[in-house]
Amino acid sequence: MRHLIDISDLTVEEIDSLLDLGEEMLRHPADFRASQQGRILATLFFEPSTRTRLSFESAMLSMGGSVLGFPSPDSSSTAKGESLQDTIRTVSCYCDIIAMRHPKEGAPVAAALKSEVPIINAGDGGHNHPTQTLTDLMTIRLEHGGFSGLTVGMCGDLKFGRTVHSLVTAMSRYPGVRFVFISPPELRLPAYLLDFLRDRGIPFSEVERMEDVLPSLDILYMTRVQRERFFNEADYVRLKDTYVLTPDKLALGRSELRVMHPLPRVNEISPRVDDDPRAVYFKQVRNGRYVRMALITRMLAE
Ligand code: NCD
């Protein structure tokens, strides 16, 4: 049985084919309206979520399937002290596939060991978030027509931002991509990912000032400073507003630039940027539903 724990669990060909199916579903949703009738998705969220959980549920409901689950651990037997593995073993008796989010890195791997059904990692701590990456890749492909030759700027909390980790891993598998990492020294991309890029000869640079690199970017991927992963509040307060994208700063970007964000945003993108045609973060939200329809379809077909 295959699970989706890390984006590298999928080959590049599988990712491309998932994006093809996601785009087909976006264009012709009615063709898939009954395609998962009788199937059940469980969404087990041990950490807060708006888009990821609801897009998974919307995806399953849009294909005629059903959903069950819990939006927070307080409403499950976790609050009584039940272990993750017992919860998974139980829920996997009630459904055909599970999407789970957990604050502990590696929790989906532990879950997969006890599950009777495929597990999808919907975010594990500051580690990975492969389905946000599918959403991001679909958006980039729709906006730029492909990945080759793109200069991708990633800005903000690159240390704890799990969506960044998964997106770097995925995009580094496409030829001709270069990265520009924009962060304060305390929030640099983890060393294991920098080593991964160096080992593969993938070009990247690390800078502190967004303004210096904005004119060279095709993508600016903004992120929230991940308050819940900080050891002390004072560090969070000091770093939280390091980057705020305003219309003035965005004026430095080219017309091909696309501004992305996995959301939720706090202060890092001014709402005054939202009407700029280069701002595509709400298109990411829309695409997330269709690419998750594609993922559920493929995983249930195996
Ligand atoms: C992200 C996450 O949960 O990692 N949100 C999402 O799933 N779209 C980003 C974040 O919380 O900052």
Image (cartoon, rainbow, N blue to C red):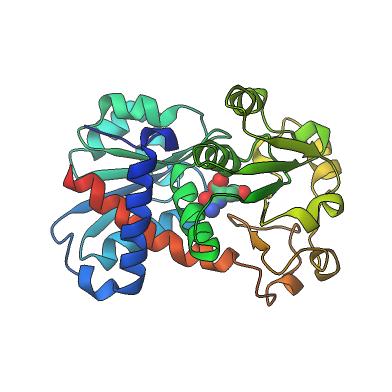
Q: Does residue 209 appear left or right of residue 205 in this picture?
A: right
Quick one: 192 or 219, which is closer to the camera? 219
Provide residue 216's location: percent of width, then percent of height: 76, 54
Provide residue 275's location: percent of width, then percent of height: 68, 77
Q: Is residue 49 visible?
A: no
Quick one: 51 or 278, which is closer to the camera? 278
The quarter of the image holding the N terminus is: top left
Provide residue 238's location: percent of width, then percent of height: 86, 42
The quarter of the image holding the C terminus is: top left
Provide residue 7's location: percent of width, then percent of height: 43, 38
Residue occupying the point 17% across, 67% down: 34
Residue occupying the point 31% across, 33% down: 87
Toward which corner of the image does residue 45 lie, by quadrant? top left
Toward which corner of the image does residue 8 lie, by quadrant? top left
Please say if 169 is above or below 133.
above
Toward which corner of the image does residue 264 lie, by quadrant? bottom right
